[in-house]
């Protein structure tokens, strides 16, 4: 059989539809251990490509003959080489390679409808499977609001054109440190208003509209509310949103299986009290039937059957360990003393999101390579 080319979109369907796949990852072992393509029914073999330069016969017993096989590398070239070598060694194998490698996987967004809203409105979640980022578009009667959009401007503007809506409002729940925001560039491209929490924006060098507690915007004649709720802790300005009275967009404060980390501006000890206050007072005062929609997910098991990342607030209040640490000193210790590694290039990413540096596209891609690390687990 010939080797075929798969796009990141093809792989995303395998993930979301819970299909089986065998991945031969030919990156170095440390890169594979740090970050890989995750799927519910995926099996893996990691053999660095330089170990296969003299032939692939030695790994053939480890390659299944009854599954699709995807060969993956960082940028594409090595995976093509290895896939072609395997095809020559065994013509019965179903072999493909990932176009653009892990770089393309890092940047792919899958839009998924979360729900219908009042007055024929719609809510979409854009799932960045390779990075764990989640962005949102709220649509109503020809108008749209974006929340926590990542840097791939065209994905959102093209989707808005497809839906025949005008992007009127663009929000960032906070100054992001793990990925480069697309909010400002989307607002510039569409004429939308760009909102950023003023407490996170003390060092930004561009104009923005302050995102303050209680701010509400309406979309379309149906007046779907997108209301801001000040919820500090991940950053001092972190702000959540309640959409249509039913959906709680929590930014990087609360996730499905974890809570936000307070240290990415170097102020963990200062912000841990704000984090606890948001999680244990502000959120516990909200209706438990609200559906939580976070800005990130950590592991593939957090995806629902339809590919969305969403869960009822009451269920998280009962089941999320970060919401059930009664002793405040224990909470402080867990949040400040047992943090995972910080995101790749997070200090430079913050500088980009402040407007202080303007790296080119390839440099931005390199900054964002790697897994999401916004949570305390």
Image: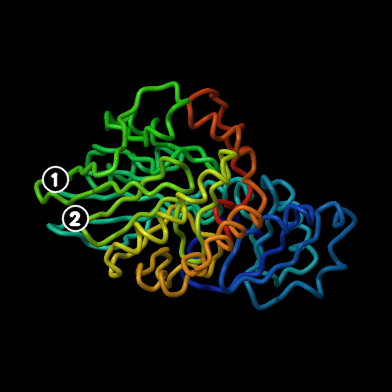
Q: Nearer the viewer, residue 255 or 362?
A: 255
Q: Which element carries disc 1, helix, strand or loop?
A: loop
Q: Quadrant of residue 366?
A: top right
State the residue position of label 2: 121
State the residue position of label 1: 220
Q: Nearer the viewer, residue 129 or 334?
A: 334
- On residue 235, which mark appears? none
Counting residues from the start of the chain, the first of labels 1 and 2 encountered is 2
**In the shown orientation, is residue 326 left or right of residue 161?**
right
The residue that appears at 24% across and 44% down in the rendered structure is: 214
Q: Nearer the viewer, residue 195 or 96?
A: 195
Q: Give the CA separation, mark 1 to mark 2.
A: 9 Å
Q: Which element carries disc 2, helix, strand or loop?
A: strand
The residue that appears at 81% across and 71% down in the rendered structure is: 60
Question: Dot 2: within a 10 Å radius of its alpha carbon, few (fewer than 14), some, or many (20 or more) residues?
Answer: many
The residue that appears at 48% across and 64% down in the rendered structure is: 13
Q: Outermost residue toward the left?
A: 221
Q: Quadrant of residue 96?
A: bottom right
Marks 1/2 in contact by CB < 8 Å: the verdict is yes
Q: Nearer the viewer, residue 332 or 97?
A: 332
Question: Dot 1: within a 10 Å radius of its alpha carbon, few (fewer than 14), some, or many (20 or more) residues?
Answer: some
């Amino acid at each position: 059989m010939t080797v075929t080319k798969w796009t990141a979109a093809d792989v995303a369907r395998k993930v979301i539809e819970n299909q089986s796949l065998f991945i031969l990852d030919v990156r170095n072992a440390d890169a594979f251990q740090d970050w890989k393509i995750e799927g519910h029914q995926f099996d893996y073999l990691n053999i660095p490509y330089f170990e296969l330069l003299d032939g692939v016969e030695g790994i053939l017993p480890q390659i299944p003959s009854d599954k699709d096989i995807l060969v993956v590398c960082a940028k594409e070239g090595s995976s093509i080489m290895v896939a072609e070598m395997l095809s020559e060694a065994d013509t019965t194998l179903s072999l493909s390679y990932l176009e653009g490698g892990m770089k393309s996987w890092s940047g792919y967004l899958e839009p998924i409808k979360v729900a219908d809203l009042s007055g024929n409105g719609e809510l979409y979640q854009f799932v960045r499977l390779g990075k764990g980022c989640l962005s949102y578009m709220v649509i109503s009667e020809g108008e749209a609001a974006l929340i926590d959009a990542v840097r791939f401007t065209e994905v959102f503007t093209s989707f808005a054109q497809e839906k025949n809506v005008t992007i009127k409002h663009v929000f960032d729940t906070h100054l992001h440190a793990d990925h480069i925001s697309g909010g400002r560039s989307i607002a510039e491209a569409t004429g939308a208003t760009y909102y950023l929490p003023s407490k996170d924006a003390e060092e930004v060098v561009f104009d923005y509209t302050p995102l303050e507690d209680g701010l509400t915007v309406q979309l379309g004649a149906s007046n779907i509310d997108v209301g801001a709720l000040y919820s500090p802790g991940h950053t001092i300005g972190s702000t959540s949103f309640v959409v249509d009275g039913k959906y709680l967009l929590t930014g990087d404060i609360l996730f499905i299986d974890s809570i936000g980390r307070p240290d990415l501006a170097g102020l963990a000890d200062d912000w841990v009290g704000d984090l606890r206050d948001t999680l244990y007072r502000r959120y516990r005062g909200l209706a438990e039937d609200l559906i939580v929609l976070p800005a990130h997910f950590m592991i593939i098991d957090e995806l629902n059957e339809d590919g969305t990342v969403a869960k009822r607030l009451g269920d998280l209040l009962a089941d999320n360990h970060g919401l059930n640490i009664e002793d405040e000193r224990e909470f402080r210790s867990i949040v400040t003393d047992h943090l995972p590694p910080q995101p790749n290039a997070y200090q430079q990413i913050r500088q980009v999101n402040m407007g202080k540096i303007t790296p080119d596209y390839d440099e931005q891609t390199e900054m964002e390579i790697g897994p999401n690390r916004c949570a305390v687990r």
